[in-house]
Image (cartoon, rainbow, N blue to C red):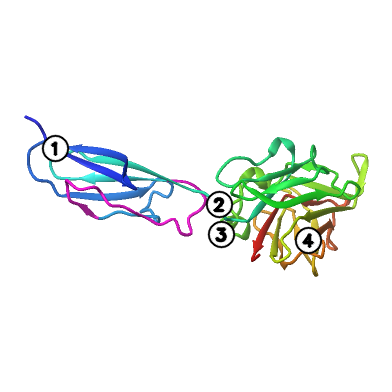
């Protein structure tokens, strides 16, 4: 007795990517039902379209749509059911990475022990060991952006703090950014009353090498958990115009700040000055910068 075998096959660009087999307990003709489950949500995957039934003897056709899908790894399990056959399963994986043409830049400010590295998005890291060294920035795709970030050697931060949040509130503006825990948890801080032997009331960052034909959105995030006072920071942005936004880092798991649609000045630069906000009530005047996202529009 030799049982029938039904094979599920995934073919991409003419190349078989994976197969699985369900084995018959008799020689009857089978009608195969298919069910797909997202391994993260345990519900039907939004990114994978699987037919309800499958005809044996032909490759299984699957449609994948990654539109709106979070960056990173996703996986699903397809299970095949047929009367008189053992169930068959097929594991599928999908990794969403930034487009090579994506000009967005991400910068993690903080501690050298909490740098943000690895896929799916490239992060630039500014920390206490390289803080005042000009840094050529790469895009999220890991290619040179042409932008250099420089923290002023005189107007700089005091040091690093590692007590920020590691989890963003679901549905919040911060959650929508999809930042990893290492990016949210640490920050650089300044102070206008002496702390740890220094006073650093103002930090200044210059972005140079910008595209003179482009506009830029600058998104700021900072978090300092387990505090009871107000620790606002003002972000004064000067390019071809002047704009400012404020963010309170105290127990922040939800909020972001931003200056949108800023063009560079005649030297193709944008200057960012950070100090404590008017509503800051901390006795040292602590202010923080955890991340900077630079989004290029046009150019």
- Residue name at image x 64 percent, y 57 percent: 254
| Discs 1/3, front | 1
Q: Nearer the viewer, residue 226 or 289?
A: 289
Q: Position of residue 185 (x, y in %)?
A: 68, 45
Mark 2 falls on what kind of element? loop
Residue 77, given in percent of the width and then of the height, sits at 34, 44
Residue 100: numbered disc = 2
When the figure is inspected, residue 158 is found, relative to residue 205, above or below; the finding is above
Q: Is residue 165 magenta?
A: no
Residue where numbered disc 3 is placed: 171
CA distance separating discs 4 and 2: 24 Å
Q: Mark 4 and 2 residues: CB-CB less than 8 Å, in contact?
A: no
Q: Between label 3 and label 4, give the one nearer the viewer.
A: 4
Q: Earlier in the sequence, mark 3 or mark 4?
A: 3
Q: CA distance from mark 2 to mark 3?
A: 28 Å
Work out whether mark 4 precedes mark 2 in sequence or the reverse, and give the earlier one. 2
Identify the residue position indicated by label 4 in the image.
Answer: 268
Q: Secondary structure at mark 3?
A: loop
- Residue 199: x %, y % from top left: 92, 47
């Amino acid at each position: 007795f030799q049982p029938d075998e039904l094979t599920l096959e995934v073919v991409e660009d003419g190349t078989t990517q994976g197969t699985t087999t369900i084995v018959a307990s008799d020689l009857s003709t089978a009608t195969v039902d298919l069910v797909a489950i997202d391994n993260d949500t345990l519900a039907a995957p939004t990114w994978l379209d699987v037919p309800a039934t499958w005809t044996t003897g032909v490759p299984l056709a699957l449609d994948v749509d990654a539109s709106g899908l979070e960056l990173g790894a996703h996986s699903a399990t397809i299970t095949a059911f047929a009367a008189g056959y053992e169930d068959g399963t097929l594991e599928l994986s999908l990794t969403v990475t930034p487009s090579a043409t994506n000009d967005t830049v991400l910068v993690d400010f903080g501690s050298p022990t909490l740098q943000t590295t690895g896929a799916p998005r490239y992060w630039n890291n500014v920390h206490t060991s390289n803080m005042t060294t000009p840094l050529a920035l790469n895009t999220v795709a890991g290619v040179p952006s042409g932008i250099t970030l420089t923290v002023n050697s005189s107007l700089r931060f005091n040091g690093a703090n590692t007590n920020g949040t590691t989890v963003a509130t679901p549905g919040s503006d911060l959650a929508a950014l999809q930042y990893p825990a290492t990016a949210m948890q640490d920050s650089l801080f300044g102070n206008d009353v002496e702390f740890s032997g220094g006073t650093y009331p103002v930090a200044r960052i210059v972005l140079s090498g910008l595209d003179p034909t482009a506009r830029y959105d600058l998104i700021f995030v900072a978090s300092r958990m387990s505090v009871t006072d107000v620790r606002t920071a003002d972000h004064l942005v000067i390019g071809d115009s002047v704009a400012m936004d404020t963010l309170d880092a105290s127990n922040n798991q939800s909020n972001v700040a931003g200056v949108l649609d800023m063009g560079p000045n005649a030297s193709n630069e944008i200057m960012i000055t950070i100090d404590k906000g008017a509503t800051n009530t901390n006795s040292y005047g602590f202010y923080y910068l955890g991340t900077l996202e630079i989004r290029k529009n046009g150019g």
